[in-house]
Amino acid sequence: MKQPEEVPPPHIASLCVFRPEHRFRRHGPRPAGCPTQVVALVALFCAAGHAGQAAQLPDPPAPIINPNGGAFDQPKVVTITQPPMSVLTNTPDWRIGTKHPTEKIEEGAALSNDGETVMAIRARTNTDNMGKFPCVNLSPDHGNIPFYIWSLEDLAGGYQPSLFAGVTESVDWDGANRDFYFGETGNRVFLLLRQWKNKDGDGGGISLWSCANGRPQEIETQKLAEFDRRPMNIFAKQPVRLEFYGKKVRVRVGESPLMCPTTDADGWVTYTGDDASGRVPAALGPTRFWISLAGGEFKGARELVLSDSPPPNVRFTCDGSEVTADSPVLSRPLTVTHNVEIRASSFYANHRRSKETVATFLSKLPLLPTESYVSPIYLTIPHAPLDGTPAQVSIDGPNGTVEGLALGNLRYRLLCPLNPNKSTPLVLHRNGIKALKEKVVWRPFAITTKAENTRLTIRRGETLLLTAKASRQSLLRIEVVDGAGQPYRSFTGTGGDLFPSLFDRAGAFRANATLDDIPAGVVDITVTPVDFKGPIACQVGHQREKEVAVYGSMDGVFFTSSAPKIMRVSVGEPTTEGVRLKLEALQYGKPALQVRLGSPTGPVFGEQPVDLFTLELAGSCRVGNGNEPTGVPMAMHMRPYLGNLRIDVSMEATFSTFDGNARSFSVNTSDTTASTNLPGFRSEVDKATGEKIGIVDFTIEIPETEDGWAFGSGVSVTECDFPYTRVGGL
């Protein structure tokens, strides 16, 4: 990488090397001073260091697998987490100061996962007084460090906490409130990181500042660089460094410098200083590095956890083999759909690792049947590869390979025809799992006098294998008529012969069997297809109604949810075409509306994925009054974005209106043009999550006569069974 003009080494203030001898036990001695030209890592947690010391260190605790194994009859979500860390009684090799030390609204602590070594440093602020601005300042005893932000968040939710990191010329700093934000003198350059955690998702704003001149409480600053917003989690994965070279400074995340219009090709930016105030480039030796968690302008608690090393990685295996440094890194909860033994171990940056945690899971999910009364058989196969690869489900049958159709909620549908004369061999393939083989027998349905009160319910397009048995060779006739008594199918043969009868039409049918023209039995057959009438969408936290068409009797037809904890389904009143269902979306997820035969737990013969979304109203519960300017900008966000939905919004305040004096407005999520003098719907990709979201921007006009308005309660979506209806027949 290109460097600026060469200057003596003492002007380099970044740290680029790892010094294992500068890791510390809680009660161990502090190391000697570090060289000026290269500043060693600050001690945040204990590593192996010298080979002779490795045996003295306790093993890090193993990760926690939850649940810790067992049998399951639904896809099981498994989480693997680090064990909770404990607070040590001191903070070795760090100086911690607070803005209000006597009020107990600030806290700094060292965290350990084994009770002996320091893993990370935690700072917390908490205030119920908006006039207070709590702050915790952290400063390592051994110069500048590359730091990793494990977390920077508002524990109450909705706020944007800030973090300052910089250098000061005060070598005798006592850990009190000498951070830049409060205007104390003696600071030179600092980095400001601001965490977003709101409607736009998690992200971090990064800017670089210097002091131009300063007096207590009135420091003027010079913004050197403002970098693009990026997800905050990048700081946990890579070291963040402030680097100085003469009058140049830059920010490096990992090995790459941050770039913006005010930096040169290598990320350096020149800053100015005031010789009289001492704000001029100087060797880092006589300076101190500090990190400060800013309190906030609102009530609530904030927390910062940082370390000089990235968080440990959890690596795992799902084939029963030992976990190694080459095993995959856990990045998400695992969904288990088959028998599996999961092993997990924590790996640390200093080559330490924990013991393994092992959990065994046994699947009771139904897969391949051994027999069926209909052909083709309708299979719903759950599958979620544990290695993160896309699921692939297929089955080899008499007509070749059939690929599974994704139904949502980790389920795949396969239709396989059966052989009427012998068992049909099937081979189920799921990537990442050994193939499963089974022979399926197509059972004939014998029409007898005992079957006269039997009612069969099958899907449209299925075939029954009809027969009637006789004690001697007899002439067998089977006549199938529809609900109007009109002939539908006719078969003639010998008693015991098998007749495949395809039902490709919906409705009620009756099959009559005779042996030598003597009645042998009757069976009623209902062919019940269900038409979901297009896609289905539901807003989380709301109930909607959905009409589905049911052809034939509702007897033996049941509607259920594939994920009852995510969506509840209940049956409402019948309609001319079928039935009206009530769908209640409880939380975000990917459920499916299911149709089952015989009982609420019977076989599934139809599924329709349900698109769930949330509508977030920016500024909800905010109260305005006549002293505020009119035309308050607002926004409504849809997560995830779904096209071709109509959203109706109404104003319930007494005098306030939407832009253009409107009391209500409607907008189609696929329409980017204005509606009722309001901007249209737009979509964009959330850079922090990669999720596509939809946005409606609008304003609220507040007249002076309005004492107050409440957005979210005063402005609400039109109340009805389902206010967000898909345009065109949902």
Image (tube, rainbow, N blue to C red):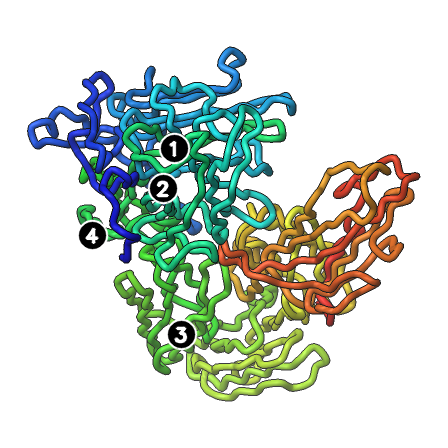
The residue that label 3 is drawn on is 403
Amino acid under disc 4: Asp
Disc 2 or 3, which lies upstream in sequence? 2
Q: What element carries label 1?
A: strand
Where is residue 84 shown, x and y percent of the image?
Answer: 36, 29
The residue that label 1 is drawn on is 167
Amino acid under disc 3: Glu
Quote the CA–CA distance across marks 4 and 1: 39 Å
Where is residue 470 shown, x and y percent of the image?
Answer: 45, 77
Which residue occupies the foreground of this view, 648 or 561? Answer: 648
Quote the CA–CA distance across marks 4 and 3: 32 Å
Question: Going 50% across and 51% down the picture, which residue do you hit?
Answer: 229
Classify residue 711 by image quadrant: top right
Q: Which mark is nearer the camera, 4 or 2?
A: 2
The residue that label 2 is drawn on is 242
Q: What element carries label 2?
A: strand
Disc 3 or 1, which lies upstream in sequence? 1
Neighbourhood count class around disc 2 (C-alpha, 10 Å): few under 14, some 14–19, many 20 upward: many
Q: Which numbered dot is residue 43?
A: none
The residue that label 4 is drawn on is 326
Neighbourhood count class around disc 1 (C-alpha, 10 Å): few under 14, some 14–19, many 20 upward: many
Amino acid under disc 2: Leu
Question: Disc 3, disc 1: CB below 8 Å?
Answer: no
Where is residue 610 shown, x and y percent of the image?
Answer: 59, 60
Disc 1 or 2, which lies upstream in sequence? 1
Q: What element carries label 3?
A: strand
Left or right placement of residue 232 versus residue 198 in this view: left
Quote the CA–CA distance across marks 1 and 2: 9 Å
Amino acid under disc 1: Val
Which residue occupies the foreground of this view, 222 or 367? Answer: 222
